[in-house]
Image: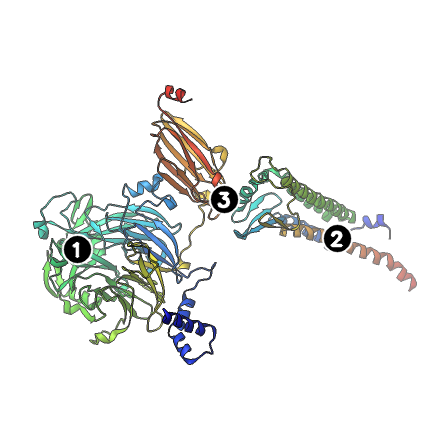
Amino acid sequence: MLRRLALGALVAAGACAPKSTPEAEQGATGRLADAREAAQRTFVEPGKLDEFYLFYSGGHSGQVYVAGLPSMRHIATIPVFAPYPATGYGFDAESKKMLGGYTWGDVHHPAISRTRGDYDGRWLFVNDNANNRLARIDLRDFKTRQILGPIANSSGNHGSAFLTENSEYALVASRFSIPLPRGTWAPLSKYATDYHGVLTGIKIDSATGTMSVGWQIVTPPFDWDLASTGREISKDWAVWSAYNTERATGRLEVTASQRDRDYMTFVNWRKAEAAAAAGKGRIIDGVRVIDPREVPGMMYLVPLAKSPHGADFSPDGRYVVGNGKLAPYVTVFDFQKFLKAAEASDTTGSEDGIPVLRYESIRVAEVPVGLGPLHTQFDDQGYAYTSLFIESAVAKWKMGPFDGHDSSLVVAKIPVHYSVGHLVVAGGDTRHPVGRYLVSMNKLSKGRHLNVGPSQPESSQLIDITGSGMKMIYEAYTEPEPHFAQIIKADLIHPIEVYPKAENKDPNAIWAAADGKVTRIGNRVEVKLFSIRSYFAPGEIDAQEGDSVIIHVTNAEQERDMLHGFGLAGYNINVVMDPGETKTIRLKADKPGVWPFYCTNFCSAMHQEMQGYLLVKPRGAAATVAAK
Amino acid sequence: MSITAWLDEVLTARARLAVLGAGALLLVALLFPLWEITMFAQMFPEGIRMSIFAHKLVGGNAGADLQGINILNHYIGMREIRAADFPEMKFIPFALGFFVLLGLRAAVFGRVHQVVDLLVLFGYFGLFSLAAFYSRMHAFGHQLAPDAPIKVPPFTPPVFGHQHIANFDVYSYPGPGSYLLGAYALVLAAVLATAVRRERVRVAAPKTAAAA
């Protein structure tokens, strides 16, 4: 304690009196000089804007988190696969329908739409590892606009969303293999032959971003893990890593860790697209599924050490980095050599008719980055960054020259706290990375934060990667659980701030209090509800027990940040309407009585007065009379 | 120099052109706000705006500010500000058209008195419009609904200059349209001033000749 105090005094002395004793200065510069620099690099003044958006996947929260860089401040949560009362998501008819009855998802890999291999800032696609879905967030309003799936035949959508060079496709891969189509039964003893994995191309409409299932490729029952898409020379190709190429069941940590090398697959998605268009393969559960044996040259396997995880194309599309997870190095494949080997049928075997190319003909380096390499990202200076889960560190290494001196390629390493999973560099998976910042998304924080009990957040650490080294400059905590993320320059996204009234095409939108009304047709009560500071019109909704009530509530505001909510007590409803937005609420008036509704999103000085009543008259007039 | 003779004096070609050009200023003035009211508050650091044109009322921020101002005003019981409630927005465009036509008359027939008519009528129109504007502001600030959620003493929003009202700093100033109207009056005055100088020179000329 005394020593701590003494150190504190020295640090304080260093800060306040630069001309103090040499000892004090030394003590101070050891920590304070770096801390000062780090603070200057990350401090964003109140009222000033961050330079980058950071889109974190929210893991099994089902959501996406938005933060700013370099401040690391959390700005917003975009609900995707789980209801989120804070923005009313999952309570109104439209978002409820999109969720399709599911109340959670597992978001792993966000992907910003791209043009010519660089982020264009139009949409953000995210996967649901749990229920085989894919969602599109429109970056015009930061709202989830489509959820596709569950995708037929595919189980455990881990290897997505990875977008082709011009967002033609979002690629999806099954983590789990099952007998096809879904719903078919086969004993686990037949796993190796009767179970199948599936790779899927999800077509993206270039004008609207609307996703639809394009085609699928049936594969051996490997566990497909992560993907990357090519650029330039490799633009027609995508790669996926696979573990459990043993085709094992049971305790996979053992049974699927027996081979020294698993695989990376190279898939020509243009060929798959053409084969599907030509009617190859067969329809399974409504989707055209192609057998690789029918389309030679579409799919190859390349051995990759061991139980690999991330597969990452270099920015120029020339190299692919395989992250070995259980091997202490990353493997670099040369795409040109891959093409040559494929052309020359330089194979060492096959798996269910899919050629396995000779490892030595394609691999150009095994870079000894450290223990537990998981993912690699790239900067604009020719460096690669690999997360080392087991070692709890990030390695920085040079992308070449690959002349056999693999160990000299590693230039720096920085410890992180603790057990990093994904890492992300600004534009680190694009044709032209921006570099400068790297965020290490660590799976464990182990008490580096104020103690909040046993359920601990994850830690995300901001690392300055300018120059040849790496410097830790900030740390933030995120709710469970970020996997991959995207960092994009803020000026590439131009969101709206209100929904312009002129663009509201909802036939039930109303813009004047006088138009608010309750209409009854049979046992259906339809309400056009007007909301503005600080009242609802009408403020009274009358229904009979058993009625179906439909409420179209419009926020008539056109002012920035003037949101209104509609929370209905007792009926488990909370919807939030942004300025200019109309939302529809459906409920069955099955609980007689008087149920207050009120504005849940604080709006104005008279917010507390913004309320009304839903009056549900009990069935039977006698009861009503008796009550009176 | 006889006033009546001067009033019947014929305008030079240049003066006629100037009168025509001044009429064009009136037409251009239709495109710009005559008056602009801007309100700042802690949570409106960029201000919310209302621009009063000769024929319309336009809120800032692509129109949204007008509704915003009305929403704020309704708390103190001020009635909604709507273009339809401003008779000025009908008579001002009419009056501007009238002055353009009257200017044509002066340009074609080219008599000094026709310009004097223009300037006098225009001066009256300007003063009347300002007074109407003031009385409208007075009415908005005084005819407050008795059941308003927030009771404030009646007030007149600023017609010219700055005023602090509750949490708002309100600035009210003429817009480019008004400056164009002012320029119109100045051109007419300049035409008259030139005519006066020419008349003086003309009256003085024979004397000079006699002296010679």
Name the secondary structure under disc 3: loop
- Between the C-alphas of marks 3 and 1, the distance is 53 Å
Q: Quadrant of the C terminus of chain B?
A: bottom right
Image position of A600 with respect to A50: above or below:
above
Side of A352 relative to A418 (left or right): left
* Residue type pointed to by label 1: Asp
Residue A468: x and y in percent read 33, 73
Where does label 3 land, which residue?
A604
Confirm or deny contact between disc 2 and disc 3 (CB under 8 A): no
Chain to which the residue tagged by mark 2 belongs: B
Seen at 92% across and 63% down, the residue is B211
Q: Residue furthest right?
A: B211
Viewer-proximal residue, A156 or B93? A156
Label 1, residues with CA under 10 Å away: few <14, some 14-19, many ≥20: many
Seen at 37% across and 43% down, the residue is A88
- Between the C-alphas of marks 2 and 3, the distance is 52 Å
**Sequence-wise first label, 3 or 1:** 1
Name the secondary structure under disc 2: helix
Instruction: Please tell me whether mark 1 or mark 2 is closer to you in this view.
Output: 1
Where does label 1 land, which residue?
A223
Residue A189: x and y in percent read 7, 50
- Between the C-alphas of marks 1 and 2, the distance is 90 Å
Label 2, residues with CA under 10 Å away: few <14, some 14-19, many ≥20: some
